[in-house]
Image (cartoon, helix red, strand yellow):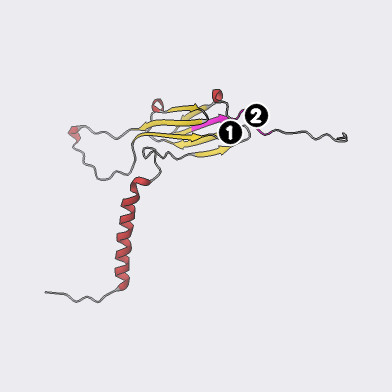
Amino acid sequence: MNTIVRWNPFREMAAMQSAMDRLFDESWRGVRPTAAGNTLALDVFETDQAYVLFTTLPGVDPQDLHVSMEDDVLTITGEVPQPAFDDKDNARTLMLERSYGKFTRSVRVGMPVDSDKIEAAYENGVLRLTLPKTPQAQPKVIPVRVGAKA
């Protein structure tokens, strides 16, 4: 037996939009900027004396973080651990949205920094790097003499 249903273009458009939303959500799921996706998100600030970088790495053991500076390239490497279950737990994966695995991020620093004085602090899942500028890269204040002839 067939049922006659009045055609509703708005219902059809809503169904199409829902299908497109699901398609894009599934397609772009792996493209989010995440640590394990090898696109570690950085916030970078500049003061007169230094560059300051922040990145969020929840769940990463500080012993597994490695920061290096070589030829004006700052590199941050580490690993986000994958959750583990015992076989006796009989756990089934229902959803995986968090990223895990090894990551690395390299950034070329455009101005000279004093690599011997770089500081790294890790607290509550946030890594803060302070890269002091060399004296040559810091702004210079030139005093203006009053009454002096040029």
Which circle marks residue 111 in the picture? 1
Q: Secondary structure at mark 2?
A: loop
Q: Secondary structure at mark 1?
A: loop
Give above or below for 82 relative to 14: above
Q: Considering depth in this image, is 108 or 6 the residue closer to the camera? A: 108
From the viewer's perspective, tell me whether residue 114 is left or right of residue 123: right
Image marks 2 and 1: residues in contact by CB distance under 8 Å: no
Residue 2 in picture, x, y percent from top left: 14, 74
Q: Quadrant of residue 125?
A: top left
The residue beneath circle 2 is: 136
Give the class, few, some or many, for how many residues have Cα within 10 Å of label 1's Cα (few <14, many ≥20): few
The answer to whether residue 121 is magenta is: no
Residue 63 in picture, x, y percent from top left: 40, 25
Q: Where does the magenta region start and end? A: 128-139
Residues at marks 2 and 1, CA–CA distance in whole angstroms:
10 Å
Residue 6 in picture, x, y percent from top left: 24, 77
Q: Amino acid at mark 1?
A: Met
